[in-house]
Image: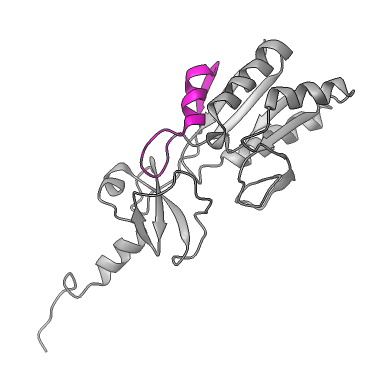
Amino acid sequence: MSELVFFSGTMDCGKSTLALQIEHNRTARGLQGLIFTRDDRAGEGKLSSRLGLVTDAVEAGPGLDLYGYVVERLSRGGRVDYVIVDEAQFLLSGQIDQLARVVDDLELDVFAFGITTDFRTRLFPGSQRLIELADRLETLQVEAMCWCGARATHNARTVGGEMVVEGEQVVVGDVARSAAEVGYEVLCRRHHRRRMTSAAARAAALSPDVLPVTAT
C-alpha cells in the first residue's frame, strides 16, 4: 500500500542525501520518480546535498498544484512510480494535502524530507501538516551535533555570527555561509536557549575576563 512518509531532522543531518539515495536506489531498479523541491541551496529546480551531490527537480513554488502536476505528467504518457519532496517544510499546508491525495488517489509513494521547526522553535506550516497527515514519521538517525558536542535539536539563524530570534520565517541560507552573512547553525536546546553560537563561544573563550591571570 502506498504511503506518505515524512523524514525529519535538524539541518545538517543528511535529509537531502537520503532523498538522493532513495532516488538512486529506485532508479537502479528501473523505476521513475518525480522530484519536487523548494528553495534549495543550489538554486531553483535543484536537489542538492552538502556532500556535493545534485540532481534536477521541479521547483514547488507556492502556486504549484502538486497533485495536478503529477496528474498532467501521467495524462501525457509520462511515467511516475513515486514522488520525492525535499525542503518540504517550505510547502504550503494545502500543498501537503495535495501530496496526501497523490498517495490516496494515484496510489503512489510520497517521500517528504524537511526540518520541523524554524529558528524560533516554531513549526513550519508544511511540517505541521505533514505531522498531521503522514502515514509514517521517520526521524533521521544521523545526528547533527552542536558545537559543544551534544546532540543538536534546534536550528538557529545567525547574522554576523550572532543568533537572532526575529525576522521572516523563511530566509534561504546555509550552515557553510561566512559569519558576515545570514546563516544557520544547529544547536542543542541549552545553547539555543542561551543564544550561544559557536562564534559566541569562541569569543567568550578568548575574552580577557575569562583567561587565567598570571603575575609578571
Seen in the picture, residue 198 relative to 38 is either above or below; the reply is below
Q: In the rendered image, which quarter contains the C terminus?
A: bottom left
* Left or right side of 87 for 208: left
Q: Based on the picture, tell me whether residue 93 belongs to the magenta stretch.
A: no
Residue 68 placement (x, y as % from top left)? 73, 23
Seen in the picture, residue 112 relative to 180 is either above or below; the reply is above
* Left or right side of 63 for 200: left
Q: In the rendered image, which quarter contains the N terminus?
A: top right
Seen in the picture, residue 42 relative to 83 is either above or below; the reply is below
Q: Which residues are magenta?
A: 117-138
Residue 212 placement (x, y as % from top left)? 16, 74
Residue 64 placement (x, y as % from top left)? 68, 32
Quadrant of the rendered structure where residue 179 is?
bottom left
Residue plotted at (50% across, 50% down): 171
* Left or right side of 53 for 12: left
- The furthest residue to the bottom: 216
Residue plotted at (81% across, 28% down): 32
